[in-house]
Amino acid sequence: MRMKWGPPRRLAGLTARLGLRRGTARTRFTALYVTLFLLSGTALLAIAALVASGGSRSSQTAPDGGTDQRATAAQAQGRIDDLEQQLAQAHDTQSRQILLGSAIALGVMAVISVGLGWFVAGRVLRPLRVMTAATRRITADSLHERLAIGGPGDEVKDLADTIDDLLGRLEGSFDAQRLFVANASHELRTPLTTMRASLDVALAKPGPVPETTATLAARMRAELDQVDRLLESFLVLARTQHSEFTDSARLTLGQLALTALTGRAKDIAAKGLTVRENRIDGSAWVWGSETLLRRAVDNVVDNAIAHNDPGGWISVAVGAEGDGAGAVSLVVESSGPVLDQRRVADLVQPFRRLGADRTGTGQGSGLGLSIVAAITQAHHGTLDLRARPDGGLRVTVTLPRTDGRATAEVPNTESGVAR
């Protein structure tokens, strides 16, 4: 038989009518405690009143004397009746005073019981609050931590041990996943290198190479390059999720953005894109992995180029917010097809694409923005994707700002790529 712990239905309905159902467990326990106290106190007063009223109904009968004593007995009986009436009135007055005093005491104790109930509920729920705070501190990067709740082997201790076991299984699963991706990416590099070398040997043989063979070799090389980039993306994801930063340094997002634009000048010109006036702050310093942050900025710029309309535009801005402990934002906007904002958030998931040009036949692997999201999260930043009403996408990468001890001169560009 299943046991359901909690207040009875009537008490639950009372707390619901009092607006306490949406409150905390401590509030509900306090309301239940006070309600039970009031019910038990009211029942005690009712029993006391019933007993007091029953005792006042007892009467006595005078003994029957002789004929000579009837006159005297009648006088005595009248005196007794007066005394009994006075005694009954005094008893009733005393009963009313006792009931009134008991009711006042019940009201005072009801107020005190609120404080006692709140205190007791807090002591009972303290282990749960400790478990909640400890669980919130544990993230995917700190699954090795445990709650380690001590105390007697009660239900709370069993719950804490169960959560610790769950964290252990999650840690093993995450480690196995990261290890598999890293090992598989490394192991697949060898056959790819062998296949690429075989193509080079076949094309380097003396004698004329048939045109179909050359075309097929070029296509295979392009596909191998695509697989190589995909494996590299897997490696970056595995490395980022494992927080392996071996090249941490202080750098500026502005310089990374200018480098990305300069390196892609040919792609921008081939598509007829216009780079709008850039507002780049040279004091926007951040701390992190130079390789990973460079990859994140490159991916954002590549996404703006690849999924843009021919003859469109790109806008890149880097700015610092606050002083010292503020944030640094990289904002990349681009023209393009109109996107559904409700589905834009899916772009941070691996192999997710939107729109007609974001299909499997495109040049992207579907990992670009997911890698940006992973790198941003690993650096304690945020990634925000917004569909522009006129078409295109607005990508905002926000990272914690750090003080730069050396200032870097970052050129400002107008209507073009930095030269």
Image (tube, rainbow, N blue to C red):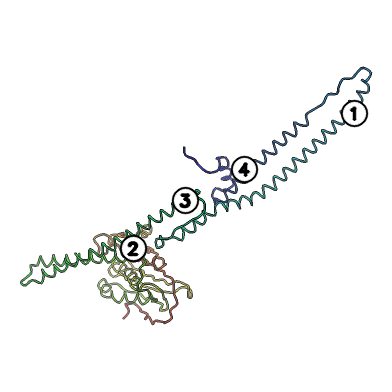
The residue sitting at 74% across, 31% down in the picture is: 54
Discs 1, 3 touching: Cβ within 8 Å: no
Quickly name the residue at label 4. Answer: 36
Q: How crowded is mark 1: few (under 14 residues within 10 Å), some or many (20 or more)?
A: few
Q: How crowded is mark 4: few (under 14 residues within 10 Å), some or many (20 or more)?
A: few
Mark 4 and mark 2: Cα distance apart in space: 55 Å
Q: How crowded is mark 3: few (under 14 residues within 10 Å), some or many (20 or more)?
A: some
Identify the disc placed on residue 159.
Answer: 3
Mark 3 and mark 4: Cα distance apart in space: 28 Å
Identify the disc placed on residue 370.
Answer: 2
Mark 2 and mark 1: Cα distance apart in space: 103 Å
Q: Is mark 1 on a helix, strand or loop?
A: helix
Q: Position of residue 243 (x, y in %)?
A: 37, 66
Q: Where is residue 352 in the image (x, y as percent from the top left)?
A: 31, 59
Residue sitting at the far left: 207
The tag earlier along the polypeptide, 4 or 2, is 4
The tag earlier along the polypeptide, 3 or 4, is 4
The residue sitting at 78% across, 29% down in the picture is: 57
The tag earlier along the polypeptide, 2 or 1, is 1
Mark 4 and mark 1: Cα distance apart in space: 49 Å
